[in-house]
Image (spheres, helix red, strand yellow):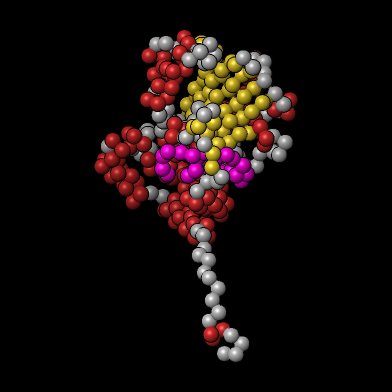
């Protein structure tokens, strides 16, 4: 119910919980927010214009708020929650030029800029970083000029390169085994940070290693991340938008046949939910089955092409000489 205030005023546990309970790491985020409400550096910061928009039919989940800093406005976009509709909207980036949340992010940025003076900083984690980048790139030129920096923490790309004049102000961080931030990003212009986690768990920024006042950086992502980036890019390029949409819609229809709305709920009653999903697979649309087969076949081809080929040593066998 609270949509504005200062960080110091967030002293009631119910308010802190309400702001963090639907995030990927609610306990860690709650602990961090509690510290910020008491830290001299952050406690006087005003936050305002908090919005949350959820439209299951449109497959849209958007949330943002603005913090007034001594030197400008920081617009923070929330990333993906654990609900199916959030993930479906993310996957829709594979075939849509702009998902609903990206359009909402641009509209939100324009509204804040019309009310509060700049300069502006935009940022977010996961999809939030993608929304920040999209709002910056698609904003009118006069508004772009007032943006000091954009921070994208392991968020997918926007499906096209960031224009060269704007790219120096986009600061993107990905972990060593980035499987999310490298998606839909033809630039590969990012800083790689060390993580204490493994595999997909490196998407959690609480696992990123900090030394002094900065993250511990690495020269490049690891082989698994590079393989994933190359494979997904080749795969999505090989499929038509119609095929990608049909496959995603069919997969979404399968999981939403259950009463679950999130992966946690799906897992909690897995035996029953598995029966429902298997029944949907058996009696599903034959056309969808054909498109899945095509997509899986193309994925296999893309994976095979992305795998590094062994470098065999050159050997002069006797039977390859001129004399033989």
Q: Is residue 192 above or below residue 128?
A: below
Image quarter of the C terminus:
bottom right
- Which residues are drawn in magenta? 175-199
What residue do we see at 47% from left, 26% from top? 54
Tell whether position 23 is magenta.
Answer: no
Which residue lies most toward the front here?
Answer: 212
Residue 281 in the image, given as x and y percentages of width and height: 35, 49
Which sits in the foreground, 93 or 279? 93
Q: Left or right: 155 with respect to 34? A: right
Image quarter of the N terminus:
top left
Quadrant of res 19: top left
Counting the numbered discs, the total is: 0
What residue do we see at 41% from left, 39% from top? 197
What residue do we see at 58% from left, 30% from top? 151
Q: Left or right: 31 with respect to 144? A: left
Residue 192 in the image, given as x and y percentages of width and height: 54, 41
Quadrant of res 29: top left
Residue 6 in the image, given as x and y percentages of width and height: 51, 11
Tell whether position 187 is magenta.
Answer: yes
Q: Is there any visible trace of residue 192 in the rendered image?
A: yes
Q: In this view, does 320 lie above or below 22?
A: below
Q: Is residue 82 above or below residue 310?
A: above
Which sits in the foreground, 52 or 306? 306
What residue do we see at 50% from left, 32% from top? 211
Which residue lies most toward the bottom here?
Answer: 323
State whether the magenta stretch is mostly helix, strand or loop.
Answer: loop
Residue 131 in the image, given as x and y percentages of width and height: 57, 31
Which sits in the foreground, 197 or 273? 197
Q: Is there any visible trace of residue 228 in the rendered image?
A: no
């Amino acid at each position: 119910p609270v949509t504005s205030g200062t960080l110091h005023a967030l002293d009631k546990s119910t308010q802190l919980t309400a702001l963090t309970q639907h995030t990927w790491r609610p306990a860690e985020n709650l602990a961090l927010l509690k510290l910020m409400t008491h830290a001299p550096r952050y406690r006087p910061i005003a936050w305002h214009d908090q919005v949350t928009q959820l439209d299951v039919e449109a497959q849209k989940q958007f949330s943002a708020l603005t913090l007034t800093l001594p030197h400008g406005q920081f617009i923070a976009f929330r990333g993906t929650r654990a609900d199916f509709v959030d993930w479906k909207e993310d996957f829709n980036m594979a075939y849509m030029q702009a998902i609903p949340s990206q359009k909402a992010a641009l509209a939100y940025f324009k509204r804040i800029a019309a009310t509060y003076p700049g300069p502006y900083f935009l940022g977010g984690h996961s999809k939030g970083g993608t929304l920040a980048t999209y709002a910056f790139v698609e904003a009118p030129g006069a508004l772009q000029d007032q943006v000091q920096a954009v921070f994208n923490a392991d968020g997918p790309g926007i499906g096209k390169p960031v224009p060269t004049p704007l790219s120096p102000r986009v600061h993107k961080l990905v972990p060593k085994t980035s499987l999310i931030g490298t998606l839909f990003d033809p630039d590969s212009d990012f800083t790689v940070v060390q993580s204490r986690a493994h595999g997909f768990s490196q998407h959690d920024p609480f696992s990123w290693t900090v030394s002094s006042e900065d993250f511990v950086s690495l020269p490049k992502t690891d082989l698994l991340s590079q393989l994933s980036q190359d494979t997904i890019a080749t795969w999505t390029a090989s499929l038509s938008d119609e095929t990608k949409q049909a496959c995603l819609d069919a997969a979404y229809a399968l999981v939403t046949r259950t009463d679950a709305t999130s992966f946690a709920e799906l897992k909690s009653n897995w035996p029953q939910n598995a029966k429902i999903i298997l029944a949907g697979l058996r009696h599903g649309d034959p056309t969808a089955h054909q498109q899945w087969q095509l997509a899986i076949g193309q994925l296999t081809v893309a994976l095979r092409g992305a795998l590094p080929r062994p470098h065999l040593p050159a050997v002069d066998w006797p039977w390859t000489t001129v004399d033989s």
